[in-house]
Every structure is written in structure tokens, then in C-alpha cells.
Image: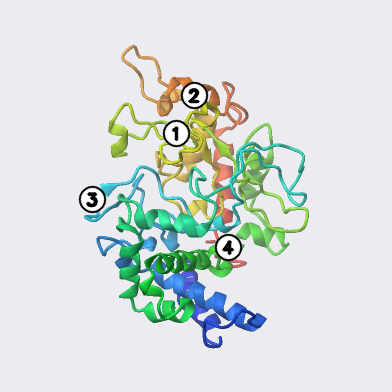
Amino acid sequence: MDLIRALALLICVALPALAADGPALPWGPAPSAKAAYARAAAIAELGRKLFFDPALSASGKLACAACHDPAHGFSAPNAQPVQTGGADVLRSGVRAVPGLTYGQFAPAFRRHFFESEEDGDESADQGPAGGRGWDGRVDRLRDQAAIPLLDRNEMAMQGAVAVAAAAGQGAYAGDIRALYGQDVFSRPQAAFAAVTEALEYFQQTSAVFSPFASKYDAFLRGAARLSEPEARGLAVFNDPARGNCASCHKSAVTRDGKPPLFTDFGYAALGLPRNRAIPANGDPGYFDLGLCGPFRRDLTGEPEYCGLFKAPSLRNVALKLSFYHNGVVRTLRDAVAFYAERDTEPAKWYPAGADGAVRKFDDLPAAFADNVEKGPPFGADRRLSGADVDDLVAFLQTLTDGYRFGREQ
């Protein structure tokens, strides 16, 4: 509850306070630094209001925050694998809601990504990385914000004109005019761009979306100690022969002293079980292939990308109520145990066919099975014990923001 209250305080109080001392907006082409900061704070505050406004949906019932709940790391507010939306709030989505915390650091999508000098070996080709959402199909936060506004399964607004009209009726309409011009609503595309830009600014508010305020951050600063299970979990997390988690979810401070993001923004095919609770999966011919479709189109026909989804940040992962792109797992422990048991106990995770044989990787066409990750901790020999899984869970719980020294969350 401390985390929830802290987020509410930050969202409702901090941003307006930042914007309150700013000059009248907009201004000429060369504002002072103080004026520029004030404008940015005012746009972020506008974005906060937009983020929590259900009037920006065709149903009038679905705000951005309805699916991206601050109490759950700005991810889904429930354990359902997909959320419902649309004009009648009855249409089912096809992917789990991604968390938004720390997402502002994602680089633009690249097929061949090389780490920066600060992060590691800049000569190593990581492969595909970056972009936003599970498939990285857009690079900017404002473009990501536009997707749910217009998606027929989500907020289902009928284009920029409808979004502009709804925003023009909002209590914040005067703020939009002050920031973007008194005639902005006579230009629907400009008003739509203002809405998505403001949502972008809000999601770049570090106090709300990237506070680096977990127990692990305190540990890295020397201000907290990990418990024995947490310390063991960190060791397993970093061990390339056991958890091997840090290979994708970077846990070390960068060379220039920045705290870790717990993701390399790369892509992997984990071979997850098919989630039959997702209505779209009722069609046996339907497959969500991540980088190569169905939503991303530019990599369709390139089989090496099929089945790959972006590795999310593990910060605030303990606040989530379902896991992975298809929400097939509902507890953090099971999300970790999948890595330990996918290949050693496949019958626990996958269905059996009529012949009794386990149908591994049943959410991926057989033609793309070679794309599935096979390195540690996966493999026929079990690399993670049950105790290791428990310790990993204990460590992952230290990544929740809102930690106060001497008080466990």
C-alpha cells in the first residue's frame, strides 16, 4: 500500500506543482531555460490528465490507466491474459498489457543492435533490439500512445477527428489551447498530435515512471542489505550457467554509473505454451508471431524473426498479475519456474496430443521451432532447482519501486 500511496501522491501533486510557476504559454522561438522547463512540466501535467480520462475512448469508460494501472507498475489491473475494450467494452485484445515503467529508455528499433560504450561491448551484435510494445513496431512514445487510442479492441476512437473532438470537450481543453494555440481544435491532426505528445511527456516523468527507488537501488548505493534469499537469488540471476537472466535483463550498474534497467530491449522466442483463454487463439490457424506479425508488417516473410518478443524490464515485475506477451502465467514464481521446467518437465506446461505425446511449443508453427531459445537455463538437464526458483523470486521482489529503508514492501 505504501507504493500505491506514493504513486498517487506523485501523479496528483508533483506534476502540477512543477508547472505552477511557469510563464504564460506558448511563447516565441527562443524561450529561457526556465520557460522551457515550465512548458515541459505543463505538457507532462496535461498528459497526466489525458492518461486518466475515459472520455478519450469510444465507450467513454476506458482510460489509458484502466489497462495501465499505477498500482501494478502501469501494467494490467487484473490477472486476465488480455483486456477488453472497443465501443462496447466487450472486444478482447490479443496480447497482454505491457508495463510502462522504465519504457522511456527504449532505443529505436534496430535489426542489428550494438551496445553503447557505457553499457558493455559495443562491438557485439545483439541482433534485433529496441522499439516499443511487444513487437517494437514504433519507436516514439507518442506513436505508441496513438495505438490504443485508435485500436478497435482498445479505446476504439474513430480517427484523429474523434480524439480531437473528445479532447476539446475535456476539462483540460484550455490547457491544450494555451500550450498548442487557441485554434488547435480547428486542426484535428494538430490536436491529435498534441494529445499523443502530452501522453509521451507524462510517460517520461521520472518521478512517476522511472524513480529508481527499489530496494535493489538502495543496495547498489550501499544504503540497504539484501537478505540471504535475495542475495542468493541475485547470484543465480547473474550466473550464466544457472539463471543466466542477466544476459537479457542487465543487472549491473553501467560503466558510466547509471542504474541497470533490467532489460537489453532485445528479442527472444521462449516457446511459451499457447494461452487458450485468449479468444483469438480459438482459431487453430491463428498465431501471434511477434516481430513478424500479425501487427508488425515490415518483417513479415523473414522467418528468423517469427515468434520473437521483446524482453521487458523486470523492474516492478512483482507487481504484475500475469506474465509474458500472452499472459499464460499468473504468478511470478511460475514465470520463473517455466525457465527451469520447460525442457525438463514439459508435460507440466504443454498439452498432450491424441497419441499422448507432449506438444511442446504449441503456440508456434513447427516451421519456426528453431527460433526458440535453447541456452541456459533451458535444456534437458535441470539447471535451476526449486530453491533457486524461490531465491530468484525473492530477488525479483527487490526491484519494486517504493522501498523505504528498514521497511520491507
Nearer to us in this view, 360 or 49 = 49
User: Of the residues under marks 2 and 4, which one precedes in the sequence?
Assistant: 4
Percent x, y of residue 227:
63, 53
Q: Which residue is mark 3?
A: 90
Mark whose residue sits in front, 3 or 1: 1
User: Of the residues under marks 3 and 1, which one precedes in the sequence?
Assistant: 3
Colouring convention used in this rendered image of the protein:
rainbow
- Alpha carbons under labels 3 and 4: distance apart: 33 Å
Residue 77 visible somewhere in the drawing? no
- Alpha carbons under labels 2 and 4: distance apart: 36 Å
Q: Which residue is mark 1?
A: 289
User: Of the residues under marks 3 and 2, which one precedes in the sequence?
Assistant: 3
User: Of the residues under marks 1 and 2, which one precedes in the sequence?
Assistant: 1
- Alpha carbons under labels 3 and 1: distance apart: 24 Å
Q: Quadrant of residue 378?
A: top right
Mark 3, secondary structure of its residue: loop
- Alpha carbons under labels 4 and 1: distance apart: 30 Å
- Furthest residue toward top: 355
Residue at figure coordinates x 59%, y 32% from the top left: 384
Mark 1, secondary structure of its residue: loop
Q: Which residue is mark 2?
A: 368
Q: Amino acid at mark 1?
A: Leu
Q: Which residue is mark 4?
A: 210
Query: Which dot marks residue 66?
Result: none
- 159 left or right of 203? left
**On screen, residue 325 above or below 214:** above
Mark whose residue sits in front, 2 or 4: 2
- 214 left or right of 60? right
Q: Amino acid at mark 3?
A: Leu
Nearer to us in this view, 220 or 273 = 273
User: Of the residues under marks 4 and 1, which one precedes in the sequence?
Assistant: 4
